[in-house]
Image (cartoon, grey):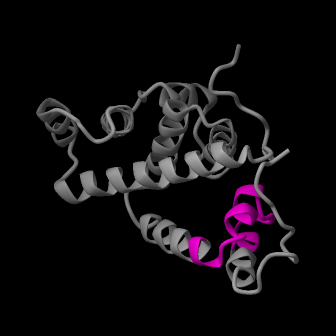
């Protein structure tokens, strides 16, 4: 059971309802995470704006790959479950590719560089090497795209940390970071 309140969509603060309605229109459901963050209209509005802006970066597959690796690095079962579902059903990634992504890799060489770089940013808390930057640039990413990858890592870290603090009930098919 979640340690922080997760309201129903109808029980959310009035200022959160329009954003939660948009989420419902996109997904057909309002996930527990969205209802959790909706407890703070300011946090929901800020997060939604950040997420909307980042939805215009890179491609959907790469964004999901980054979310998967960061969730794995941070051991966030909620985010692994959510992004495994989204990667399968919306980004159309195969189970093999998802498994590779979780481990900082990809079958696609360009995606591999992005996921490996995102893993390094998350694991090393931004203290990446010149070689890490050269590798991802060598795969065809420019400075703006590196900033976008870092922003996607930051977005994922926020969701990972919030879900870990809250112990958000998983409302997707469950995927565990440590499958022991």
Question: Can you give x and y, in whole percent of width and height, for residue 136 in the image?
Answer: 22, 39
Residue situated furthest top in the rendering:
180
- Name the residue nearer the viewer: 171 or 160: 160
- Name which residue lies at 46% across and 50% down: 63
Residue, x 43% and y 64% (percent of image)? 54
Q: Position of residue 11 (x, y in %)?
A: 87, 76
**Residue 140 appears at what percent x and percent y?**
20, 45
- Residue 107: image quadrant is top left
Left/right of residue 92 with respect to residue 9 in the rendered view: left
Instruction: Pick the residue in front: 125 or 146.
Output: 125
Q: Quadrant of residue 17?
A: bottom right
As drawn, is 165 to the left or to the right of 27?
left
Give the x, y percent position of residue 12.
80, 76
Quadrant position of the N terminus in the picture? top right
* Quadrant containing the C terminus in the rendered view: top right
Quick check: 27 above or below 123?
below
* Relative vertical location of residue 116 with respect to residue 1 in this rendering, above or below: above
Q: How many marks?
A: 0
Is 34 part of what is drawn in magenta? yes
Q: Nearer the viewer, residue 116 or 77?
A: 77
Reply yes or no: does residue 121 show up in magenta: no
Could you tell me what secondary structure mostly forms the magenta stretch?
A: helix
Residue beneath the point at 77% across and 34% down: 174
Which residue occupies the foreground of this view, 21 or 62? 21
What span is in magenta?
23-43
* Residue at 25% over, 51% down: 146
């Amino acid at each position: 059971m979640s340690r922080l309140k997760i309201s129903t969509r109808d029980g959310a603060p009035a200022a959160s309802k329009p954003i939660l309605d948009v989420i419902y229109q996109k997904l057909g459901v309002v996930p527990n995470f969205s209802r959790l963050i909706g407890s703070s209209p300011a946090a929901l509005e800020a997060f939604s704006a950040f997420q909307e802006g980042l939805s215009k970066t890179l491609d959907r597959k790469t964004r999901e790959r980054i979310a998967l690796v960061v969730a794995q690095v941070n051991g966030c079962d909620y985010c692994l479950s959510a992004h495994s579902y989204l990667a399968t059903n919306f980004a159309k990634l195969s189970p093999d590719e998802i498994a590779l992504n979780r481990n900082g890799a990809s079958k696609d060489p360009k995606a591999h560089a992005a996921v490996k770089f995102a893993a390094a940013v998350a694991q090393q808390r931004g203290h990446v090497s010149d070689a890490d930057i050269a590798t991802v640039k060598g795969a065809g990413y420019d400075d703006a795209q590196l900033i976008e990858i870092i922003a996607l890592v930051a977005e994922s870290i926020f969701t990972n940390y919030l879900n870990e603090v809250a112990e958000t009930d998983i409302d997707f098919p469950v995927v565990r970071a440590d499958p022991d």
